[in-house]
């Protein structure tokens, strides 16, 4: 399953966003370090289910289908807040980031309202962009630390062969889900001195860490608390050149609760107030005007979908066993949907379903065209694929 980590300084609304996206109740409070242990939950991104095109009724197993919309599960991980100097043990340190080693991408929550300092304490006129800069620095130190751990001893063993240093780095970062290809690309670009790797300094490791990260871990900025942000702050964020979405996690959570309680009826990004309670009505109307009308949405779902579909460039494919019925062998129509990176091949899909299926791959059938395709066939969004394998 695709994994997404939620990171940011304390008190910015990470757990509020987590809760809004997963419908899991977790502690939320207006002081730093409310979250200590990570919260893990399932969020869904949406795609139109192909069953509608074929006049079939699907029987989903791994991804619910709601009125023709396929809900694709994403594992979301909400962790404690990071503060400047976390890599030196400040705040809760950076050890808890180890829970995010396998994350494919990140939502970086920043405080658009500028009402918190970098430690998450009340402040005024704080710069929302500073939330991104220090965080990048802490991530770099964390990754550099993982590469550096026991490096001198290992490096002395290595010859001057380029390959051996590279292989050592690969070994150290596979746990972070960083591939051989990424390491090669980064080493080619950086051209570090390979003759005496045991003499590499902190700066060398930071540079390496940063390049590996940029190459492999997309980060979507969730400019949260946009409901309480000044025009100046909104403009600063717009102009910064980051991939970002304005988010009001608290509004998303409030709307979900209001809907559950029958106080509103939601219709896409809009809603109708049905409650007769005057105070609640006023609050909801305020939210409609100052969040939905102003920003188009609460931004919660949007930041996850943009990360998954645009930045991670994920497409949806449906493996089946019967190319005519588009079902598994028990007759379940379009049982599973897989999110894979664009550029993945038919063989990659086979491996994603099962290692064994990948190893025994012979050919595949594109069920939309009924054409036979080879192992290197590049999957397209919405493909329905039967994999033919050796018994
Ligand atoms: N105005 C406003 N407040 C918000 C928003 N999202 C969260 N908050 C408030 O910000 C405070 C912190 O929220 P949390 O979700 O606990 O923040 P966190 O980042 O998980 O905090 P730690 O776990 O302590 O690092 C709470 O008082 C929330 O109600 C938002 O979109 N707008
Ligand atoms: Mg929290």
Image: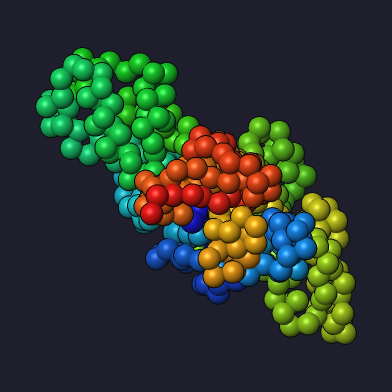
Frontmost residue, 101 versus 232: 101
In the picture, measured across the screen, residue 299 lies left or right of residue 182, that is right
Q: Nearer the viewer, residue 162 or 362?
A: 362
- Please say if 102 is above or below 211: below
Q: Residue at x 77, y 44 (%)?
A: 231
The colour scheme of the drawn protein is: rainbow
The percent coordinates of residue 196 (x first, y second) are: 19, 18
Examine the image and state in which quarter residue 184 appears. Answer: top left
Residue 251 seen in the current view:
no
Residue that appears at 59% across and 68% down: 332
Rendered residue at 78%/82% (across/down) = 262
User: Residue 97: x percent and y percent?
Assistant: 38, 52
| Quarter of the rendering containing residue 58 | bottom right
Q: Is residue 186 above or below residue 140?
A: above
Between 48 and 368, the residue placed more toward the observer is: 368
Which sits in the foreground, 36 or 65? 65
Residue 37 appearing in the image? yes
């Amino acid at each position: 399953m695709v994994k997404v980590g939620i990171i940011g300084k304390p008190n910015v609304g990470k757990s509020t966003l987590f809760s809004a996206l997963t419908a899991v109740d977790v502690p939320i409070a207006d002081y730093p370090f409310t979250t200590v242990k990570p919260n893990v939950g399932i969020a869904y991104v949406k795609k139109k289910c192909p069953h509608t095109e074929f006049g079939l009724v699907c029987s989903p197993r791994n991804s619910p289908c709601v009125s023709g919309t396929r809900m694709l599960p994403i594992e979301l991980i909400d962790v404690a807040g990071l503060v400047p100097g976390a890599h030196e043990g400040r705040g809760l340190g950076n050890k808890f980031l180890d829970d995010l080693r396998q994350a494919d991408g990140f939502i970086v929550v920043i405080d658009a309202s500028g009402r918190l300092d970098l430690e998450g304490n009340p402040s005024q006129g704080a710069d929302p962009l500073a939330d991104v800069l220090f965080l990048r620095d802490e991530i770099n130190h964390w990754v550099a630390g993982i590469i550096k751990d026991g490096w001198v001893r290992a490096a002395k063993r290595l010859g001057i062969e380029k390959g051996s240093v590279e292989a050592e780095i690969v070994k150290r970062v596979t746990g972070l889900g960083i591939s051989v290809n990424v390491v090669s690309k980064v080493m080619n670009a950086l051209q570090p001195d390979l003759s005496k790797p045991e003499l590499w300094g902190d700066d060398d490791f930071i540079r390496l860490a940063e390049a590996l990260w940029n190459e492999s871990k997309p980060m979507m900025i969730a400019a949260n608390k946009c409901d309480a942000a000044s025009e100046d702050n909104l403009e600063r964020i717009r102009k910064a050149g980051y991939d970002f979405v304005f988010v009001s996690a608290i509004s998303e959570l409030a709307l979900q609760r209001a809907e559950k309680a029958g106080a509103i009826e939601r219709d896409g990004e809009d809603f109708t107030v049905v409650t007769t309670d005057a105070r609640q009505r006023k609050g909801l109307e305020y939210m409609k005007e100052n969040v939905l009308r102003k920003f188009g949405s609460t931004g919660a779902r949007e930041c996850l979908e943009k990360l998954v579909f645009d930045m991670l460039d994920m497409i949806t494919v449906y493996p089946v066993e019967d190319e005519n019925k588009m079902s598994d062998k028990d007759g379940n129509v379009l049982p599973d949907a897989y999110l894979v990176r664009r550029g993945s091949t038919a063989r990659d899909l086979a491996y994603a379903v099962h290692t064994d299926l990948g190893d025994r791959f012979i050919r595949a059938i594109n069920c939309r065209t009924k054409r036979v395709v080879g192992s290197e066939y590049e999957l397209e969004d919405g493909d329905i694929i039967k994999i033919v394998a050796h018994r």
